[in-house]
Image (tube, helix red, strand yellow):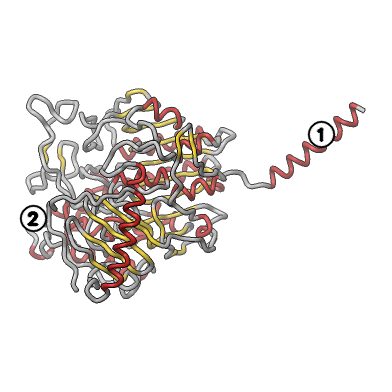
């Protein structure tokens, strides 16, 4: 009798084993977030910067033409990690602490059995205090990056304003360090280690690049000096616009936005060599970021994890037009911990790229990065909120190399990752009530189908505000009036239709206010630091 039971039990186990083997395992998930990368910087999004690895990812994945972030680092990262609008989780500025009404992907995936890793900017990794490495360590098995401190960072050296930790302990940057390479080294090692474990893994690669300062390796900058000296910002924008139409990422009817009002025509620009050097440094940062993506993808292949891994690549906001406003060194105290002074400013006597400088790209080149769109980071015009999104998942993405015009939002990243992992979004986590998720899974789109998408999307960033519903977008700059655009033909937001369609303005204004009241959003109006470019009526 015992022998017969043992035989039947063994047969049952064998059947269960066969059934289990037939079921697809939960995927690994890698989310790569660029920092201040414009909509058209990558080659597969129309740019002239060499991004062969992103281009390959796009060629075997799916590109989104109408995907949005939240225009600023903190709001975007909080939305990505929680699936909620930034204002719902208490995020109104470039950084801050999440409130107790949310739960992050790390917390949910960790509880569901995923091995977790994070590298780079660790903002919003948990709904507890991300400034405290011990809190991060509760939900992130391995991590390296800044989990405390504030202010600008540095690509080559340790600075006063940024504390770096590895797995909860203070981390000293090695000699001859370059942050993008450091991030990549950690990501590659994490993949190699995690792939040997029985559980799937979630890796968040929060790149610093290409956020200012313009710090780039000489070999990466050298590729672009002559290109931008010969091309200039006007021709670069024209070529990107043409290429975007050819790639099917924008409508052939979409115009090119006006050159930023603060920038002269390239032919009239003084200090062309220095200006070209600025964009060469920025392009070098993007180039290095692309190399990072290539090494991560190669690590997945070497580990045998590439057949069942979802990879998502996007940017937290549009390219920045901002200068750094003040010196970083203080009397008796340098910004760099090694005592080397830092030369700060966007002036021709400070050549960008090296570790003793702090230079930014400025409005003219940011206008190129965000082409063909209007305005920059922090605004809710398309140049501030439109992001590239590449989704890659072999065997799941049905139309490799295709472009989808599905309207999407950065809150969808949480929803998509949880859907792919088979993890339910809760109404309660660790004793705290959690708001219903705003994001919607992109998985049906990846599979070539339809989803119940967003009827409206809304923004409130740094005194700016916007709402999109279908083809219509209502948007206002800081302290500015509402402007109305038909994005089906004018994603460059060049023809203000507010006077022509007052009823549409009234309807969308009421819907934005309803959203703002529901989500606790505030325009946070303040005196504008610069004029916002005007669209034609």
Residue 222 can be seen in this image: no
Label 1 sits on a secondary structure element that is helix
Which is in the foreground here, disc 1 or disc 2? 1
Q: Nearer the viewer, residue 108 or 192?
A: 108
Q: Quadrant of residue 345?
A: top left
Seen in the picture, residue 494 relative to 57 is either above or below; the reply is below
Residue 375, given in percent of the width and then of the height, sits at 22, 59
Taking the image as drawn, is residue 267 in sight? yes
Residue at position x 41%, y 43% from top? 81
Q: Dot 1, crowdedness within 10 Å: few (<14), some or many (≥20)?
A: few
Judging by the rendered image, the residue that carries numbered circle 1 is 10
- Residue 386 percent location from the top left of the image: 32, 58
**Residue 156 lies in what quarter of the image?**
top left
Can you give x and y, in whole percent of width and height, for residue 296 in the image?
43, 43
Cβ atoms under marks 1 and 2 closer than 8 Å: no
**Is 199 situated above or below 248?**
above
**Left or right: 470, with 381 as reference point:** right
Q: Which mark is residue 271?
A: 2
Nearer to me, 357 or 460: 460
- The residues tagged by marks 1 and 2 sit, at their Cα atoms, a distance apart of 79 Å
Percent x, y of residue 85: 36, 49
Q: Return the disc, 1 or 2, that comes first in the chain's sequence.
A: 1
- Say which mark, if any, is on residue 142: none
The C terminus sits in image quarter: bottom left
The furthest residue to the right = 1
Given residues 93 and 174, the one toward you in this image is 93
């Amino acid at each position: 009798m015992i022998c017969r039971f043992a035989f039947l039990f063994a047969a049952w186990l064998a059947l269960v084993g066969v059934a289990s083997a037939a079921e697809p395992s939960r995927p690994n998930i890698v989310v790569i977030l660029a920092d201040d990368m414009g909509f058209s910087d990558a080659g597969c999004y129309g740019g002239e910067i060499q991004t062969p690895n992103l281009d390959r990812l796009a060629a075997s994945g799916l590109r989104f033409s109408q995907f949005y972030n939240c225009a600023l680092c903190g709001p975007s990262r909080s939305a990505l990690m929680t699936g909620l609008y930034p204002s719902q989780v208490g995020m109104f500025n470039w950084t801050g602490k999440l409130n107790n009404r949310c739960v992050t992907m790390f917390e949910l995936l960790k509880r569901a059995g995923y091995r977790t890793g994070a590298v780079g900017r660790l903002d919003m990794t948990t709904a507890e205090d991300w400034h405290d490495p011990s809190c991060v360590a509760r939900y992130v098995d391995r991590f390296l990056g800044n989990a405390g401190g504030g202010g600008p960072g540095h690509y080559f050296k340790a600075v006063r304003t940024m504390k770096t930790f590895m797995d909860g302990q203070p981390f000293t940057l090695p000699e001859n360090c370059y942050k993008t390479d450091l991030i990549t080294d950690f990501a590659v090692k994490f993949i190699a280690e995690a792939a040997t474990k029985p559980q799937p893994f979630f890796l968040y690669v929060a790149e610093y690049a290409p956020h200012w300062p313009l710090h780039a390796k000489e070999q990466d900058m050298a590729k672009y000096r002559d290109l931008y000296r010969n091309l200039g910002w006007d021709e670069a924008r024209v070529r990107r616009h043409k290429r975007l139409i050819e790639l099917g990422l924008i409508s052939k009817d979409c115009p090119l936005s006006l050159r930023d009002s603060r920038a002269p025509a390239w032919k009239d620009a003084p200090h062309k060599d220095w200006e070209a050097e600025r964009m060469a440094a920025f392009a070098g940062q993007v180039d290095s970021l692309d190399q990072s993506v290539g090494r991560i993808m190669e690590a997945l292949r070497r580990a045998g994890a590439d057949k069942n891994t979802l990879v998502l690549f996007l940017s937290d906001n549009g390219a920045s037009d901002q200068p750094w406003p003040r010196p970083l060194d203080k009397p008796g105290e340098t910004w760099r911990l090694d005592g080397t002074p830092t030369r700060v400013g966007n002036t021709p006597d400070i050549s960008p790229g090296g570790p003793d400088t702090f230079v930014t790209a400025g409005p003219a080149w940011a206008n190129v990065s965000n082409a063909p769109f209007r305005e920059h980071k922090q605004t809710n015009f398309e140049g501030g909120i439109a992001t590239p999104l590449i989704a890659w998942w072999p065997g799941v993405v049905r139309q490799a190399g295709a472009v989808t015009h599905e309207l999407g939002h950065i809150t969808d990243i949480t929803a998509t990752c949880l859907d792919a992992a088979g993890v339910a979004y809760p109404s309660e986590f660790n004793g705290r009530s959690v708001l219903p998720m705003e994001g919607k899974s992109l998985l049906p789109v990846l599979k070539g189908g339809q989803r119940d998408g967003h009827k409206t999307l809304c923004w409130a960033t740094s005194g700016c505000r916007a709402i999109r519903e279908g083809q219509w977008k209502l948007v206002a700059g800081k302290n500015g009036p509402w402007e109305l655009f038909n994005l089906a033909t004018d994603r460059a937001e060049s023809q203000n239709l507010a006077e022509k369609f007052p009823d549409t303005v009234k309807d969308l204004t009421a819907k934005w206010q309803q959203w703002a009241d529901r989500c606790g959003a505030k325009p946070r109006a303040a005196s504008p630091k610069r004029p916002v470019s005007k669209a034609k009526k």
